[in-house]
Image (cartoon, rainbow, N blue to C red):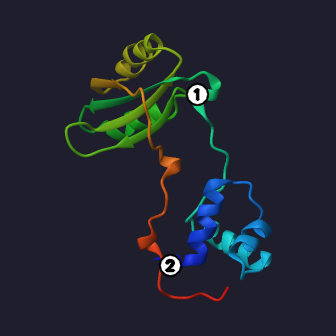
Amino acid sequence: MFKIDKIDYEIINALMEDGQVRAAEIARRLGNKSERAVRYRIDRLVDNKIIHLSAIINPKGLGLNVVADVLLEIESGLIMDVANKLAALENISYVACSIGETDVSIQVLGTTNAEIYAFVTEVVGKIPGVRKTTTKIVPVVLKDTYQWKLPASFISNTIDDQ
């Protein structure tokens, strides 16, 4: 298991605040690390798949103002087949297999409630193996997955001099 120390924690938080912040600026904020050491740590965090650096799209900025969570019941033995078909659809921003009353959950983006309804009933509901869909319009999102912060409890007490 990869260990995160306080410096890694601070670097991750800085990158989450602004993904374009330069290593030199992070080093300046840390006060006691060189730009080279910060770059090394960022590379190490990426190489160990602790962080992934990329652009995050704001769907609302593109007019996709309606978000719906859709829970699906799938015929036994077809869950992964259906999930893979759903993952290939452009209107869907999230696909996950689950355990419990439903088999797959998805998040659908659209411009209107009617567009969401048509997509769920005419596209999602007609995929072979889909038995039932339950759609919930999400009018307010207080925290999205890309806003999740690393809990401080993940900081290792081990000091790394890099």
3D distance between C-alphas at marks 1 and 2: 36 Å
How many numbered marks are there?
2
In the picture shown, does residue 158 fall above or below 93? below
In the picture shown, does residue 111 fall above or below 154? above
In the picture shown, does residue 45 fall above or below 53? below
Q: Between residues 29 and 63, which one lies in front from this camera angle?
A: 29
Residue 51, position as x, y percentages in the image: 58, 62
- Indicate the quadrant containing the C terminus: top left, top right, bottom left or bottom right: bottom right
In the picture shown, does residue 51 fall above or below 2? above
Quarter of the image where one finds residue 24 = bottom right
Q: Which residue is mark 2?
A: 3
From the viewer's perspective, is 160 left or right of 153?
right
Q: Are marks 1 and 2 in contact (CB under 8 Å)?
A: no
**Residue drawn at the location 48% of the way across and 47% of the way down:** 145
Quarter of the image where one finds residue 11 = bottom right
Residue 105, position as x, y percentages in the image: 35, 36
Tell me, for residue 131, which label it has, or none.
none
**Residue drawn at the location 74% of the way across and 54% of the way down:** 20
**Residue drawn at the location 52% of the way across and 76% of the way down:** 4
Amino acid type of the residue that numbered disc 1 sits on in the rendered structure: Lys
Q: Secondary structure at mark 2?
A: loop
Residue 17, position as x, y percentages in the image: 63, 54
**Residue drawn at the location 25% of the way across and 32% of the way down:** 75
Query: Residue most toward the left?
Result: 101
Q: Between residues 32 and 37, which one lies in front from this camera angle?
A: 32
Q: Secondary structure at mark 1?
A: helix
Q: Which residue is mark 1?
A: 60
Amino acid type of the residue that numbered disc 2 sits on in the rendered structure: Lys
Labels 1 and 2: the sequence-earlier one:
2
From the viewer's perspective, is 158 left or right of 120?
right
From the viewer's perspective, is 5 left or right of 85?
right
Q: Residues within 10 Å of mark 1 (few under 14, many from 20)?
A: few
